[in-house]
């Protein structure tokens, strides 16, 4: 059973512009490493995090559970990179266990669309572990489809490359819970 982080069930913070991997201090890198391991089961090292192909730009986000933007209050990461003309690649999208299933993924998806659609980016592409049915369903609900099987992409198991039109997502009652 995974340990649930305190304060992540109902977030007072929210998504904010995030640091790129190359900008991370030792403390931030360790927080991201722990988040990745909890969320994906993949073990990343500081060098592998810093070398992710993510530029410093306005389509990177971090989720916080308080008004402070600190490594200890970080609960999620969405890192993206321009990929091909009019295409964005999601390099990493992970939430801690306490933030999943509460609408925070939908919030940042729409923030990403708000920033990228006016720039002419119309397509989104990503890789996802084939066993991560919850994430696959999330992406399919947003119009992405599996384009290719990726054998050997993940250390443990097969992956899929998914692609689709970048668009806003407006579900019924998929709004994050806020504490008053």
Image (cartoon, helix red, strand yellow):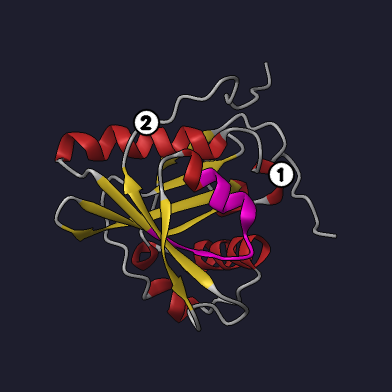
* Residue at 42% from the left image edge and 64% from the top image edge: 24
* Residue at 27% from the left image edge and 61% from the top image edge: 55
Q: Which mark is residue 84?
A: none
Rendered-image quadrant of the N terminus: bottom right
* Residue at 45% from the left image edge and 38% from the top image edge: 108
Sequence-wise, which precedes: disc 1 or disc 2?
Answer: 1
Residue that protrudes farthest toward the top in the picture: 180
Q: As drawn, is 36 to the left or to the right of 114?
A: right
* Residue at 23% from the left image edge and 36% from the top image edge: 117
Q: As drawn, is 124 to the left or to the right of 36?
A: left
Residue 24 drawn above or below residue 116: below
Q: Is residue 133 magenta?
A: yes
Q: Secondary structure at mark 2?
A: loop
Q: Quadrant of residue 10?
A: top right
Dot 1, crowdedness within 10 Å: few (<14), some or many (≥20)?
A: some
Q: Secondary structure at mark 1?
A: helix
Dot 2, crowdedness within 10 Å: few (<14), some or many (≥20)?
A: some
Q: Quadrant of residue 53?
A: bottom left
Q: Nearer the viewer, mark 1 or mark 2?
A: 2
Residue 148, position as x, y percentages in the image: 41, 68
Q: What residue is shown with label 2?
A: 168
Rendered-image quadrant of the C terminus: top right
Residue 174, position as x, y percentages in the image: 58, 26
C-alpha separation, residue under disc 1 versus residue under disc 2 = 24 Å
Choose between 131 and 7: the one closer to the eye.
131
Asked whether the viewer can see residue 95, the reply is no
Residue 173, position as x, y percentages in the image: 60, 20
Q: Which mark is residue 98?
A: 1
**Magenta residue span:** 126-138
Q: Quadrant of residue 30?
A: bottom right
Residue 103, position as x, y percentages in the image: 58, 33
Q: Is residue 83 magenta?
A: no
């Amino acid at each position: 059973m995974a340990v649930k982080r305190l304060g992540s069930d109902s977030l007072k913070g929210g998504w904010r512009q995030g640091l790129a991997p190359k900008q991370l201090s030792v403390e931030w890198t360790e927080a991201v490493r722990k988040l990745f391991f909890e969320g994906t089961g993949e073990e990343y090292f500081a060098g592998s995090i810093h070398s992710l192909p993510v530029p410093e730009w306005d389509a990177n986000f971090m989720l916080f559970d308080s008004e402070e933007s600190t490594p200890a209050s970080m609960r999620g990461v969405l890192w993206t990179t321009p990929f091909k003309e009019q295409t964005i690649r999601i390099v990493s999208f992970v939430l801690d266990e306490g933030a999943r299933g509460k609408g925070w993924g939908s919030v940042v998806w729409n923030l990403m669309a708000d920033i990228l659609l006016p720039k002419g980016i119309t397509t989104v592409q990503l890789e996802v572990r084939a066993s991560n049915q919850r994430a696959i369903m999330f992406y399919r609900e947003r119009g992405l489809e599996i384009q290719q099987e990726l054998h050997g992409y993940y250390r443990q198991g097969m992956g899929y490359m998914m692609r689709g039109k970048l668009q806003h997502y407006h579900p019924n009652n998929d709004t994050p819970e806020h504490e008053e």
